[in-house]
Structures are given as C-alpha cells and as structure tokens.
Image (cartoon, helix red, strand yellow):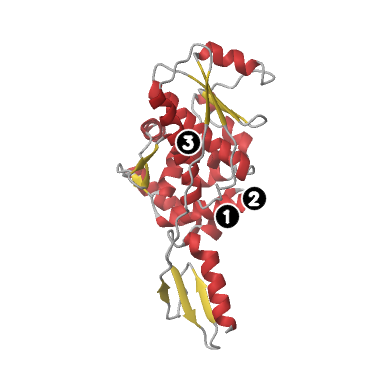
C-alpha cells in the first residue's frame, strides 16, 4: 500500500519531465523499487512510460497601446496579442511554469527611435542602453518603437515578453539563460496546435563568424560567468555573447536531454538558487559537462536547420 502511494507521488512529481527524458525503474535485492533518469550499471532496469499532460491553456487579453503617430490595424493588434500568448504558452507547456498566475504586461508602441529614447529618458536614470525594446519591471511595461522592419518590431515584442515572464516567475535566472530564452521567443510561432521555433538567422550567422575568428567562448567559461561579466564579455571586440547564448539555448531545446536540463535549471533558479550554472551541469545534464561540450561542438559543425516543434 505504501509503495503504491509513493509510486503515485513519484508520477506526479516526474510527470513534467516525462516529455524530456527516459525514466527507469528497478528493484534492488531488498525489494525496494527505485526510479531515476539515468541507467544504473549491473541493474536490470525497465523504462517507465509516463504520459505528459498538457495545460488547459487559457488566453490572456493583452493591453496594446499605440503612441502618438502610431497606427495599428486590427489584424496587427490581434497578431501581437496572439504572439504574446504563444510566449506565455511556451513557458507553461514546455518549461512547465504556472502561467495561470497572471504575468501583467502592457505593450506600448512608439513611432520611432527618437520617441523611444525620449520616453526612456523619463524612466531610466543615466545613459540609455542600446536596444530595440525594453521591459520596465517597475511598471510591467514593454516599450518598443516601430521600425522599418515592422516584422522585426513584432519579434522584439515577443523577446521582451520572455523577459517579462522571467522577471515575474524566476528573477534570479542568470543573464545568459534569460537572454537565450528571449532570443528563442523571437522565433516562436504556432503551427496548428503545436508551438514552433525556427532557427534564429542572425544568431546562426554571428556564431559562424565568431567560430571562424576563434572568438567562441568555451561553454564552461560562459556558464561560469556572473551576469555582469557575461553582458560585458567581448564588448571591446564589437561582439556580445547574446548570439552564442541564443544559439546554445536553441541547441539545448533541440534534444530531450537539453530540454530536461533547461527545465530543471529554470525551476531550480525559480526556487531562489543562485548557483552558477556550470556547477549544476553534472547534476542536471546526462553525461555532465564533458558530454555537453562534445554535443555543442558537434552542433556547431552541423547545426540543424529544421524548426523545433513542441
């Protein structure tokens, strides 16, 4: 009876991970049943088939505010609202965060870069960061400006929505992971009932150029950086680690092992942990740092071009 209760509890705990990694079961010499996501030597194990349950998704109404000189069609407003809901759903369905806890966000679109800079100068002290959009946590505002590449403006809104969710649900997420996830949100769309992430063309091109110029940061090195160091790395060379991080998170999302690692990592930080990610790889990535580095090196030699479907 007790074993049945423990097994039921185990199913509830591990159900979010079922879509990511194999779960194994074996009985030891004392008749105790063990479960885990790694195979144990000298034990006869069997895979446990767990059926993941997707959330009963509910769309949110998004406040979209057009500033002076900005005209949005009804179709564009609907597009923005749908895009933001897709980002919410990604964190709910793929990373298993409870997005039914509302993440309040208002979206303000300004007419041009000058209007954008003028607005931010009244909200931010000191020099303004170079940006195409920003999430202001104190007021839960996403602010962007209309660019000539209007499609790029919509992608920026999705990027900043990722930051808004992270700021609300897991504020201690390190900068590399915060930015890496936001980069994926730019390329997030819906395909039927599934979510789809395309390869980010700018990140892929930057990573190829960095690799050719021997500027690629070692995985262990950038996972060991404090957020402030990560943001400033390569600045003197005209590069940032944002493109490499974006491609690295895309690489992680492309495999069950990588998705499991991301889920475990984000939830650990959501509980308030501030351990550098490099110290958590051996615990949360099957095969540890050496296997992660090898898999990343293989990815760089032949990165997949097809979209990721969730």
Query: Tag 3's secondary structure?
Result: helix
The residue identified by callout 1 is 280
Badge 3 is on which residue?
A: 84
Q: Which x, y percent locates residue 9?
A: 57, 71
Residue 217 visible to the viewer: no
The label nearer to you, 1 versus 3, is: 3
Does residue 88 appear in this view?
yes
Badge 2 or badge 3: first in the primary sequence: 3
Q: Which residue is under mark 2?
A: 275
Cα separation between marks 1 and 3: 31 Å
Which residue appears at 61% of the width and 39% of the height?
A: 167
First reached walking from the N terminus: tag 2 or tag 1: 2
Mark 3 Cα-neighbour bin, 10 Å: few <14, some 14–19, many ≥20 = many
> Is the C-beta separation of discs 2 and 3 under 8 Å?
no
Q: Camera-side residue: 161 or 67? A: 67
Instruction: Give the percent coordinates (x, y) of residue 198.
Output: 35, 39
Q: Is residue 89 above or below residue 77?
A: below
* Alpha carbon distance from label 2 to label 3: 30 Å
How many neighbours does mark 2 have within 10 angstroms: few (below 14), some (14-19), or many (20 or more)?
A: some
Count of numbered tags = 3
**Residue 191: where, in percent of width, then height?**
33, 43
**Residue at image coords 43%, 36%:** 82
Q: Which residue occupies the extreme bottom position in the image?
A: 30
**Going from the N terminus, do you reach mark 1 or mark 3 first?**
3
Mark 1 and mark 2 in contact (Cβ < 8 Å)? yes
Residue located at (39% from left, 20% from top): 149
Q: Nearer the viewer, residue 179 or 204?
A: 179
Q: Quadrant of the N terminus?
A: bottom right
Q: Is residue 292 left or right of residue 276?
A: left
Residue placed most toward the observer, 173 or 189 = 189
Label 1 crowd (10 A; few <14 / some 14-19 / many >=20): some
């Amino acid at each position: 009876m007790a074993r049945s209760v423990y097994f039921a509890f185990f199913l509830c705990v591990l159900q979010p991970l079922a879509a990511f990694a194999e779960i194994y079961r074996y009985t030891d010499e004392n008749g105790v049943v063990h479960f885990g996501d790694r195979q144990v030597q000298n034990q006869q194990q069997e895979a446990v088939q767990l059926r993941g349950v997707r959330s009963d998704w509910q769309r949110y109404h998004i406040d979209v505010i057009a500033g002076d000189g900005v005209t949005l069609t009804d179709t564009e407003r609907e597009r923005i609202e749908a895009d933001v809901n897709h980002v919410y759903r990604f964190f709910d369905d793929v990373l298993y965060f409870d997005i039914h806890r509302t993440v309040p966000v208002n979206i303000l679109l300004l007419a041009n870069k000058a209007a954008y800079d003028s607005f931010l100068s009244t909200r931010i002290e000191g020099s303004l960061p170079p940006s195409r959009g920003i999430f202001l946590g104190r007021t839960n505002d996403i602010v962007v400006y209309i660019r000539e590449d209007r499609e790029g403006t919509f992608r920026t809104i999705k990027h900043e929505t990722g930051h808004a969710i992270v700021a609300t649900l897991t504020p201690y997420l390190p900068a590399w992971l915060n930015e890496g996830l936001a980069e994926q949100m730019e390329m997030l769309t819906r395909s039927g009932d599934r979510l789809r992430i395309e390869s980010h063309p700018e990140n892929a091109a930057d990573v190829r150029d960095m690799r050719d110029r021997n500027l690629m940061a070692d995985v262990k090195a950038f996972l060991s950086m404090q957020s402030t160091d990560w943001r400033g790395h390569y600045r003197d060379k005209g590069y940032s680690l944002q493109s490499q991080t974006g491609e690295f998170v895309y690489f992680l999302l492309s495999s069950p092992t990588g998705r499991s690692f991301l889920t475990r990592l984000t939830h650990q930080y959501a509980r308030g942990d501030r351990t550098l990610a490099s110290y958590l790889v051996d615990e949360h990535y099957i095969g540890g740092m050496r296997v992660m580095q090898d898999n990343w090196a293989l990815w760089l030699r032949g990165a997949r071009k097809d979209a990721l479907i969730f």
